[in-house]
Amino acid sequence: MFPHKTMFYMFSQCNRVTTLTLFSMRVSVNSESLLTVDYFTEVNPHMSGIPNPFAPTRPNKTPDSGHDIRDDLLGHELIVTGPTAPGLSPTLEAPSSPWPHTDIGPFEGLAVIGLHGGAGATSISTLLGESARDVGRAWPLSQSTRTQAPWPLPVIAVARTDRTGLSAADRFVRSWANGQLTGSQLSALVLIEAGPRTSDARKKATRRLLRMVPRGTHIPWMDPWLDAPPDPARLPGRIKRIIKLLNTPTT
C-alpha cells in the first residue's frame, strides 16, 4: 500500500488548448476515482468570459444614466399649457368665497404660494433659487422696487395631489378663471404627487387642472424628500428641467 500523497495532473489536447488541472488534494494512489471529472476544473484560455475564481469580485458598473425619473402622469411632457388669461378660460363656476389677497411690498422676483397647508411651496421656492420667495397662501400683490408702481408679479401656485390639495387647486383655478385674481400674473400651477400610488380619479383631476392654467407641471413622488429637504444640487434630470422652465419668464 502506498501512503496518501498530494498530486497534480495536467492533460493537453492538440486540436484545442485545454488544460485540466487537478487541484492539490490528498488522494490514494490506488484509488480508482483518481481521474474522474469530479476532481478536475476545465479552463479554456480562449473563453475570456470565464471569471477568475481567485480574483476579488467587483460590482458591474453601468454608464451613468443621468439620475432621471419617470412621470407616468405626463410622460415625456415637462409642462402642459392652457389658457393664458382668464378671459380665454372655459366657463367655470365661481367659488363661493373669494381667494384672499395680500400686499407683500416691493418685490420683483418670483412669488410662490401654497394653496393649502403642506403644499410644498417652501420646497419649490428653494429649488427655484434666490429670485423666488414663498409668500404664503394668499394671492400676492407687489410694487416695483424702483418706481413703487404696481408690479405684475409672476406667481407660481403649488398644491399636493391628495384630496385636500386637489380641492384647493380646483377652487384656486376657478377663482383665476373668473377674473378674481388680478394685479399679478399667474405663471404656473405645480402639482406635487402626494404618495407613491394614486387613484385613476386623482390622476384625471390632476391632468384637468394642469391644462386649465397658462402652464401646468407635475412633480412625481419623491420618497427621499420625506427624510430631508430637496437638494438643488442633487435633483433628478426631469425636475432640473422643470425648474429651469419655471424660472423662464412667460410672454
Image: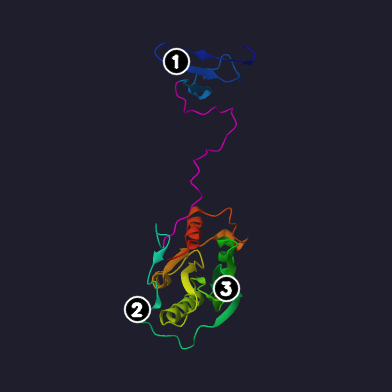
Query: Main structural element of the magenta stretch: helix, strand or loop?
Result: loop
Q: Where residue 226 sits: x, y (%)?
A: 60, 63
Compute the Cα span from label 1 to label 2: 79 Å
Residue 18 drawn above or below residue 189: above
Magenta-drawn stretch contains 243 = no
Magenta-drawn stretch contains 48 = yes
* Residue 133 numbered tag: none
Q: Please give the name of the residue rendered at 58% of the width and 58% of the height, measured from the top-left corner.
A: 224
Which residue is tagged 1?
17
- Name the foreground residue: 204 vs 148: 148
Which residue is tagged 2?
90
Q: Is residue 170 left or right of residue 149?
A: left
* Residue 147 numbered tag: 3
Q: Nearer the viewer, mark 3 or mark 2?
A: 3
Mark 1 vs mark 2: which is more N-terminal?
A: 1
Label 3 Cα neighbours within 10 Å, binned few <14 / some 14-19 / many ≥20: few
Span shown in magenta:
46-72
Q: Quadrant of residue 208?
A: bottom left
- Element marked by disc 2: loop
Amino acid type, mark 3:
Thr
Q: Where residue 44 sits: x, y (%)?
A: 46, 21
- Name the foreground residue: 168 vs 46: 168
Q: Is residue 93 left or right of residue 155?
A: left
- Name the foreground residue: 144 vs 140: 144
